[in-house]
Structure formats: structure tokens, C-alpha cells
Image (cartoon, grey):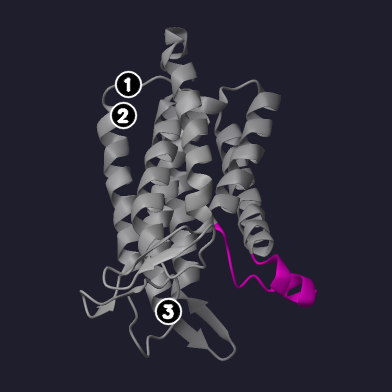
């Protein structure tokens, strides 16, 4: 979706301004932390551990997001190394990796179950995907391909936001069944990878690799870098789900 003349700022006072994108990120972080702390306390975890865990996820999630963006645009940043620190681009998978690794290390040190913490993070991840994709519309980025059959660009940002909303609803539906520890996170990761690779990435105007193909009438293309990585991500998620299902003693660990 492309809408001209949208103001990326919520408000500006002199040289200081708050952008819609930044507000979306901050709001999703706040909601994610609130859910982790509230639900974690209900399950008997120490409040200090929950706040420390949330802080690590945020800090290393941001570092991972920026690092992932730099690596996927390495040629540009090798030519413009000082632009690495401008923070004008983030990568979702990098944020996920940074948050997961930092959380795993912290939980291991504290002797807590990482799988349950990962489950609690799913709410913030989905809220973030919903809000950030909407903010992408204001920033006029993450654009879809032109589809001749539609006579306009695919609203790729709305597709992505819908994916986040669907998976957020799914989380609370599944939670009623009291799934095993780790199931919520890895099943979310599996379906997120399926939906992003099959829907959002198909219509996004991203560079194509591996004998790329574009159908200009439908406005779909294959294969983006994310689509190439998707089978490996699905294999990882499927393996982790298999491990969880074969050990019933993992149910509802805290």
C-alpha cells in the first residue's frame, strides 16, 4: 500500500519529533513486557527476573534487528560504514534471534525454563508485527508488487499486519488447552514462517534470488531471501515441536 504525503511524525517540537514507527515499536515493547511480567508473576516467577528478562530481550532484540539489517545490506554498509549507526533500518528475524539468544542465556543462568519464557514472548511479538507493519504504511516502505489484475500495488503491509493479528488470536485460543512448555513459541514460529513466506513475501517488492520469477498480472514473485530460508526455519520449528510432543513431562513447566 502506498499513500502519498503521509506525515511520519506523530508530533514535532523544533528538532525533536516522535515518529509513528517509533511509537509502534515502543507500544509493542510495553505490551510485551506487561504480559511477560503479569503472566510470569501469576506463575510464580520473581518480578526481578521478569523485568531483567524483558530488558535483555528488548536491548538484544534491537541490536539483533539492526545487525540483521546490516548483514542483509552488507554491500551498502561496506561502502558507507558510518551509516551502520544511523538506525534507519531493522530486520525482524535479527530481532527475533537477538531476543531468543539473550533470553536463553539468562534463563539458563537463573535456572528457569526457557521454553515457558519463549511462550510468554509470543504476545509481544505478534502485537509488534501488527503495529510495525501499519507504521510501515506511514513510512512508505515494505511496499507490495504492482498487480495488473488489481490495477494497484498489493497492500503488503496490511497482509503482514493481518498475519500478526491472526497469530495473536491463535495464541489465546491455544492457551486455553494448556499446551506443553515451548509449544506456543515454536508453533507460532512455524505458522509465522509459513504465512510470511507464502503470503507476505510473495507480494512484497523485494529482490529475488535463485532464478527469480514474477507474475506481473497477479503481482507475485519468487524467491526472496526470506522464502529461500523458510524451509530451513520450518524444519527447525517442526523438530522442536516433535521434541516437545514426545516428552509429556514438559507440560506446563514454570
Question: Residue tagged by mark 2?
Answer: 175
Q: Earlier in the sequence, mark 1 or mark 3?
A: 3
Q: Is residue 36 visible to the viewer in this orientation of the structure?
A: no
Vertical position of residue 96 compared to residue 222: above or below: above
Mark 1 and mark 3: span between their CA atoms? 40 Å
Q: Is residue 101 visible to the viewer in this orientation of the structure?
A: yes
Q: Quadrant of residue 149?
A: bottom left
Which residue corresponds to the image point at 44% horizontal and 81% vertical from the top-left? 8
Tag 3: Cα neighbours inside 10 Å, few (<14), some, or many (≥20)? some
Magenta region's main secondary structure?
helix
Tag 1: Cα neighbours inside 10 Å, few (<14), some, or many (≥20)? few
Mark 3 and mark 2: span between their CA atoms? 36 Å
Q: Secondary structure at mark 2?
A: helix
Q: Please give left or right for residue 8 compared with residue 77 in the image.
A: left
Q: Is 17 covered by the magenta stretch?
A: no
Q: Which residues are magenta?
A: 73-91
Mark 1 and mark 2: span between their CA atoms? 5 Å
Vertical position of residue 242 compared to residue 184: above or below: above
Question: Residue tagged by mark 1?
Answer: 178
94 and 79: which is toward the camera: 79
Q: Which mark is residue 140?
A: 3
Q: Secondary structure at mark 1?
A: loop
Vertical position of residue 1 compared to residue 197: above or below: below
Amino acid at each position: 500500500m502506498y499513500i502519498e504525503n503521509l506525515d511520519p511524525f506523530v508530533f514535532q517540537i523544533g528538532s525533536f519529533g516522535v515518529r509513528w514507527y517509533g511509537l509502534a515499536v515502543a507500544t509493542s515493547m510495553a505490551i510485551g513486557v506487561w504480559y511477560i511480567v503479569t503472566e510470569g508473576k501469576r506463575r510464580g516467577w520473581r518480578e526481578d527476573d521478569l523485568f531483567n528478562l524483558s530488558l535483555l530481550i528488548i536491548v538484544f532484540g534491537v541490536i539483533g534487528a539492526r545487525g540483521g539489517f546490516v548483514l542483509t545490506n552488507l554491500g551498502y554498509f561496506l561502502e558507507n560504514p558510518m551509516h551502520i549507526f544511523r538506525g534507519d533500518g531493522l530486520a525482524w528475524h535479527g530481532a527475533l534471534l537477538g531476543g531468543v539468544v539473550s533470553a536463553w542465556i539468562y534463563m539458563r543462568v537463573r535456572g528457569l525454563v526457557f521454553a515457558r519464557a519463549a511462550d510468554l514472548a509470543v504476545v509481544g511479538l505478534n502485537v509488534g508485527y501488527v503495529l510495525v507493519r501499519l507504521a510501515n504504511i506511514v513510512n512508505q516502505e515494505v511496499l507490495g508488487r504492482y498487480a495488473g489484475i488489481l490495477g494497484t500495488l498489493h497492500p503488503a503491509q496490511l497482509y503482514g499486519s493481518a498475519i500478526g493479528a491472526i497469530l495473536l488470536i491463535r495464541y489465546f485460543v491455544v492457551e486455553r488447552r494448556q499446551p506443553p512448555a515451548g509449544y506456543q513459541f515454536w508453533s507460532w514460529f512455524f505458522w509465522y514462517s509459513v504465512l510470511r513466506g507464502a503470503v507476505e513475501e510473495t507480494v512484497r517488492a523485494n529482490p529475488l534470488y535463485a532464478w527469480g520469477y514474477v507474475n506481473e498480472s497477479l503481482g507475485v514473485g519468487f524467491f526472496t531471501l526470506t522464502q529461500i530460508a523458510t524451509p530451513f526455519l520450518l524444519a527447525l520449528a517442526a523438530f522442536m515441536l516433535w521434541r516437545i510432543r514426545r516428552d509429556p513431562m514438559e507440560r506446563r513447566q514454570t
